[in-house]
Amino acid sequence: MDHPRMTLISANWKMHLNHIEALELVQQLAERFRASTIPAGREVSIHPPFTCLAMVGATIAAERVPISLGAQTCHYADAGAHTGEVSAGMLAALKVRYVIAGHSERRARGETDQVVREKIDAIYRHTMQPILCVGETADERHRGVAEEKVRQQLAAALSGRPAELVAAAVIAYEPLWAIGTGATASPDDVANMCSAIRDELERVAGTHAAAMVRIQYGGSVTAETCEALLSGKDVDGFLIGGASLDAEQFSAIVIG
Ligand code: 13P
């Protein structure tokens, strides 16, 4: 069934590319997205490291490329004695639109559900949109508790929020065992989990808000696997690591 949601394809560059390398990649993308335009109904976001956020933002604005600027995380406080951290307000001032919250690589280093929730509070305070990452470990999948884990992460981050804020969220389903491993989840498993996510969002914020939320899949997505993965009715895009560092691969995924 057709739905009104824009597909969102996001490039998570993680801790790759210095500002010179980043400029090169964003220029390559600008050339490709100008020549063969991004298909209607598709949106692209790029999430570079903090050190090149301003430059990537200025380049996509100057080149008039229809790419949204994203960040990989932020601090939950608006300001203060937090050495090395970057606030949501600082990102909003750079015209960042999407901020990833709760990526498993950060959860693994101690980012709790409570911290993820407070980061999402900060992202909304500064009128940006969170990309909330959820997903199970290989062990949780084998034990049959994958869906329970994902529902619990969603509820911890989003329950009790106004429906219009939940509607603006993006969810990235990223099973930990598929990240950077080359082992993509099967299209059926992705479709089923994304439907369970939509169901949990309905429980948390109602049918109308849940229908607005974009649900991405992330985990070893490539130009070869993307089409089949996107066939699930509740799959609305991708959060891409490795393949997003290569202009040709990434634009093949976006342009299709
Ligand atoms: P890969 O595409 O490299 O598996 O990374 C997925 C991811 O973690 C995106 O946030």
Image (cartoon, rainbow, N blue to C red):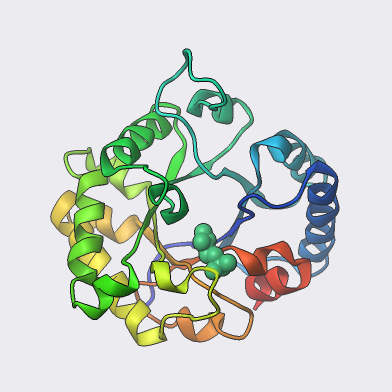
Which residue appears at 69% of the width and 38% of the height? 53
Which quadrant, please, contains the N terminus?
Answer: bottom left
Which residue appears at 54% of the width and 74% of the height? 220
Q: How many marks?
A: 0
Which residue appears at 71% of the width and 36% of the height? 51
In the rendering, at what x and y percent does residue 110 appear? Answer: 37, 43
In the rendering, at what x and y percent does residue 116 appear? Answer: 34, 40
In the rendering, at what x and y percent does residue 74 appear? Answer: 49, 34
Q: Residue furthest top?
A: 80
- Which is more toward the observer, 189 or 93? 189
Which quadrant, please, contains the C terminus?
Answer: bottom right
72 over 199 or under it: above or below = above
113 to the left or right of 132:
left
127 to the left or right of 146:
right
Picture quadrant of ligand 1: bottom right
198 to the left or right of 94:
left
Is any part of residue 41 visible from this angle?
A: no
Which residue appears at 75% of the width and 45% of the height? 60
Q: Residue furthest left?
A: 203
137 over 161 or under it: above or below = below
Is any part of residue 54 visible from this angle?
A: yes
Q: Quadrant of residue 27?
A: bottom right
- Which is more toward the observer, 6 or 54? 54
In the rendering, at what x and y percent does residue 32 appear? Answer: 81, 65
